[in-house]
Amino acid sequence: MTDILEGIRVIDMGHFVAVPSGAAVLADWGAEVLKIEPLTGEPQRGIMALSPSPVNWRFEVHNRNKKSLALDLKTEKGRDILYAVVKASDVFMSNYELAALQRLGVDYPALSGINPRLVYALLTGYGTEGPDKDRRGFDMAAAWASTGMQYLLGESGSIPPTQRGGVMDRTVGFHMVAGILAALLHRERTGQGQLLELSLYHSGVWTLAADLQVAMAGLPLAPYDRARALNPLVGKYCTSDGRWIQLAMLQSDLSWHDFCQALERPDLENDPRFIDMVVRAQHCEELVSILDDVFARRSVDQWETTLREHNCIYGRVRTPDEVLADPQALANNFFAEIEHPVVGRTRMVTTPVRFRQNPASLRHTAPETGQHTEDVLLELGYDWNDITRLKDEGIIL
């Protein structure tokens, strides 16, 4: 059985999360991914979580299944090696600043001149045109704060919520994967390579598209105020043990009868203040207050049981540990085991697309800096004398 992207070679000249996460998806799906790093290693290697673990798990999850080639691209010989790899590759991915790519001679005009069939995927912070085209940006600034997402996700009057590390980066990474696969399909049909451009900012705007489309129509948008929710059946409520339940009954009229039965409050069903979704919106503060009191009388486990019995749409606000032990996640292979050279047998999060006939796989953990440099050079036709000289000259690691 072959991997679904077997035979595709990808150059990952990315750093931190967005591009490496997209390249990790392609690697999981069977592409050969060569991670091009400076001799000092990709910067994310040096950013360790405040954890007693000897392993940088944030780096691991975004760089598994890859090979590492460490080069000094500021030298002509280093660039020559990369150019040789480009000739034999299908895809080049980078989130280096455009000016840096131009200085290094690895921008699209340079590499497409070497390989006209190359699919070149460039990620910037804010796009390649306009007043912010040269502005640096991580996802929490360009895709979280700048797009309106941070503003709208906060509770009214509260401090804007902090994004979890790399959340929008991984979203952008999948956007990049989609664009690359479309470009490869186009190349299959026409023989032509492609330059595709993405930005953290635009991906963030697309992620928030429904809200921004409402704003574009001139309708007001504001941070969420649970006490004034137009649909209290999409609210969050605290249980007797201090846990939270998120209700998600968007078609509230269809769910109202079952919900009242779950609450053991049949009196609410025909209460003239709450008779339908329009009237409930007019009396939302009263209903939220009632629901706060009702939910505070039982534990989260008790509520989960009764809401499920009455076919209500809800989500328990889980801790990470609860997710890792969730029978539903386990049954659907959200995690897979892999042998790690430092900690032995361990689990990693899998990518969220499941190919039934050609399943993705975790073949090996993230490489050490330059771990595969010699192997790649030998494949390119360099001999051991060449490799020794390149090491002595500081071109490779």
Image (spheres, helix red, strand yellow):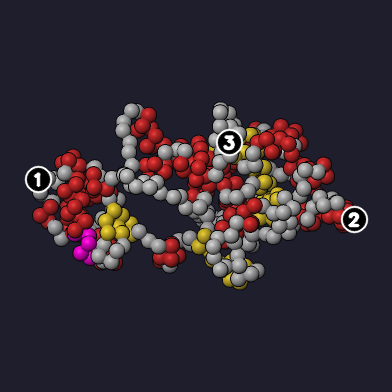
Q: Amino acid at mark 3?
A: Arg
Q: Are marks 2 and 1 in contact (CB under 8 Å)?
A: no
Residue positioned 27% across, 59% down in the render: 238
Secondary structure mainly formed by the magenta segment: loop
- Labelled disc at residue 351: none
Q: Is residue 357 left or right of residue 300?
A: right
Q: Is residue 227 left or right of residue 321?
A: left
Report the residue marked by disc 3: 135
Residue positioned 22% across, 60% down in the render: 295
Residue 290 locus on image (x, y percent): 17, 54
Q: Identify the element where label 1 is drawn.
A: loop
Depth order, front residue of 23/127: 127
Residue 113 locus on image (x, y percent): 75, 33
Q: Is residue 144 left or right of residue 314?
A: right
* Residue 15 visible in the shown view: yes
Q: Identify the element where label 3 is drawn.
A: loop
Neighbour tally class for label 1: few under 14, some 14-19, many 20 plus, Cα within 10 Å: few
Residue positioned 27% across, 48% down in the render: 226
Report the residue marked by disc 2: 385
Magenta-tinted stretch:
294-298
Neighbour tally class for label 3: few under 14, some 14-19, many 20 plus, Cα within 10 Å: few
Q: Earlier in the sequence, mark 2 or mark 1?
A: 1
Residue 323 locus on image (x, y percent): 42, 63
User: Any magenta on residue 296?
Assistant: yes
